[in-house]
Image (spheres, rainbow, N blue to C red):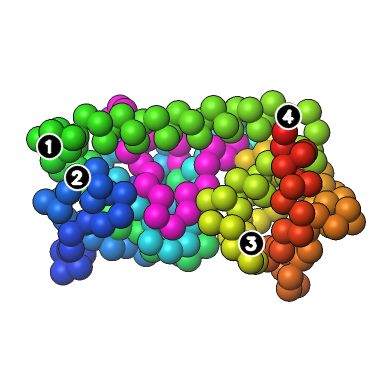
Amino acid sequence: MLLRINRASRRPLDGHLAALAGEQVFCSEFSYRRGTEVFGEGEEAEYVYQILSGAVRTYKLLSDGRRQINSFHLPGDMFGLENGTTHRFSAEAVVETRVRITKRRSLLETMTSRDEGASSVLSLVTRTLQHAENHMLLLGRKTALERVAAFLLEMDERLVHPNVLTLPMSRRDIADYLGLTIETVSRAFSTLRDEEMLRFDGQTQREIILLDREGLAEYDA
């Protein structure tokens, strides 16, 4: 999906992108409505993205029509930096999402011109591989409770242990990430609630108070 860059909003990169490329690369801000495609699988990997607010899911559609979500990207996360010329996954905004984007070529050129550029690239690749390995381990768990507990602990850690864990993604998203059905995910949440490991806050059941992180970690062990 081609993006129209708003030149007037160009500013130096910050956060993870700045750590990789320094202050010599400029970016633009762009907003996506809920459910809007950021890029599609097989499209040219022209831009690199960093989330300012909201969330993005990257996924593949399987041959039987099912969707497998590879990752959820949250504020501060980078995505879209490929080791080839095209995207391996599609990306969509989970909710109203604001991102910073920069040209992939400009970022890579700046990174390779710095002494610490190779180390920065290696660090980014290592984080990506670690996530892929953790996701494979998660999908290999035997029970739905183990998968859901691991997912909650992952989100809790990535959001820095908030008092109320606000999940931007739907039950369908969680099911497609964990390789489960919506009904199975809902039953697992209900079981964890009945065992007083969590409590729902509000009517949407996307705001969760984790009451027993140690108990969840036992399922995740």
Q: Quick one: quadrant of the C terminus?
A: top right
Q: Which residue position holds label 3? A: 165
- In whole angstroms, how far apart are the C-alphas of marks 2 and 4? 38 Å
- Give the residues drawn in magenta, as a range: 68-90
Which element carries disc 1, helix, strand or loop? loop
Residue 200 painted magenta: no
- In whole angstroms, how far apart are the C-alphas of marks 1 and 2? 8 Å
Labels 2 & 3 near each other (Cβ < 8 A): no
- Residue at 30% x, 55% y: name it: 15
**Callout 4 environment at 10 Å: few (<14), some (14 to 19), or many (20+)?**
some
- In whole angstroms, how far apart are the C-alphas of marks 3 and 1? 39 Å
Quadrant of residue 164 within the rendered picture:
bottom right
**Callout 3 environment at 10 Å: few (<14), some (14 to 19), or many (20+)?**
some
**Callout 2 environment at 10 Å: few (<14), some (14 to 19), or many (20+)?**
many
- In whole angstroms, how far apart are the C-alphas of marks 4 and 3? 23 Å
Q: Which residue position holds label 1? A: 114
Which numbered marker is on residue 76?
none
Q: Is residue 132 visible?
A: yes
Amino acid type at image mark 3: Leu
Labels 1 & 4 near each other (Cβ < 8 A): no
Q: Which residue position holds label 2? A: 21
- Residue at 57% x, 50% y: name it: 157
| Sequence-first disc among 2 and 3 | 2
| Sequence-first disc among 1 and 4 | 1
Which element carries disc 4, helix, strand or loop? loop
Quadrant of residue 115 within the rendered picture:
top left
Where residue 45 appears, as percent x and y from the top left, is 30, 38
| Sequence-first disc among 3 and 1 | 1
Amino acid type at image mark 1: Arg
Query: In the figure, 42 relative to 184: above or below?
Result: above
Labels 1 & 2 near each other (Cβ < 8 A): yes
